């Protein structure tokens, strides 16, 4: 799969979900379907989608229940559009982020940076609200994502597909 297409689909899904919430999530699912159609490793992508869907339900569900953040619409454990973002995140490890599979410290650093920034962007766009101070919110998210992303990349590195290179291309 072309890395640019992979990143573009992820970013389009993120913006559709954040800006359109549940309305945008339907179109976003179509884009994820397109990704699976184009992917040389759709079964690995589906496996990662299942894992990250569960992770998202657990992590964001617990944070939401604890009052860490809230959303525009009442949803338990988390809004549908946020679940779709977790699904979209799962299309990256075997494609555009495949180069991170053996780089644990870099994965932790990028997780600690990228995870909180994505949440903060959603807050800035008005789709969610931190109920803690900004430094405490970003700090907790940095810790969570510094642990989560290397684990995701480790699990992705354990997946093997005939004909798929380390970069996830055909």
Image (cartoon, rainbow, N blue to C red):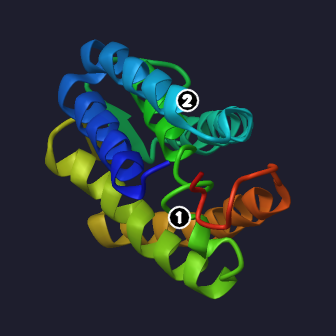
Q: What residue appears at the point 40 percent right and 67 percent down from the top-left corner?
A: 114
Q: Nearer the viewer, mark 1 or mark 2?
A: 2
Residue 79 seen from this side: no
Q: Give x and y (percent) for residue 133.
A: 30, 63
| Residue occupied by mark 2 | 36
Relative to 72, say whether 143 is above or below: below
| Residue occupied by mark 1 | 97
Residue 50 seen from this side: yes
The secondary element bearing badge 2 is classed as: helix
Question: How far is disc 1 from disc 2 in space, using C-alphas?
Answer: 16 Å
The secondary element bearing badge 1 is classed as: loop
Q: Crowding at label 1, few (<14), some or many (≥20) Cα neighbours within 10 Å? A: some
The answer to which of 102 and 95 lies nearer the viewer is: 95
Q: What residue appears at the point 32 percent right and 39 percent down from the top-left corner?
A: 14
Residue found farthest to the bottom: 105
Q: What residue appears at the point 59 percent right and 65 percent down from the top-left corner?
A: 167
Left or right of 151 on screen, residue 26: left
**To which quarter of the image does residue 15 belong?**
top left
């Amino acid at each position: 799969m072309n890395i640019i297409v992979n990143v573009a689909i992820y970013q389009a899904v993120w913006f559709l979900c954040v800006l359109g919430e549940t309305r945008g999530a339907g179109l976003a699912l179509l884009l994820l379907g397109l990704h699976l159609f184009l992917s040389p490793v759709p079964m690995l992508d589906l496996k990662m989608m299942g894992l990250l869907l569960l992770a998202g339900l657990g992590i964001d569900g617990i944070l939401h229940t604890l009052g860490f953040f809230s959303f525009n619409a009442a949803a338990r454990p988390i809004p549908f559009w946020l679940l779709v973002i977790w699904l979209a995140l799962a299309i990256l490890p075997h494609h555009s982020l495949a180069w991170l599979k053996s780089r644990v410290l870099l994965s932790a650093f990028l997780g600690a940076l990228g995870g909180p920034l994505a949440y903060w962007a959603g807050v800035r766009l008005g789709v969610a609200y931190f109920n803690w101070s900004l430094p405490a919110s970003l700090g907790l998210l940095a810790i969570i994502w510094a642990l989560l992303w290397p684990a995701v990349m480790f699990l992705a590195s354990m997946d093997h597909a005939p004909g798929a290179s380390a970069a996830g291309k055909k």
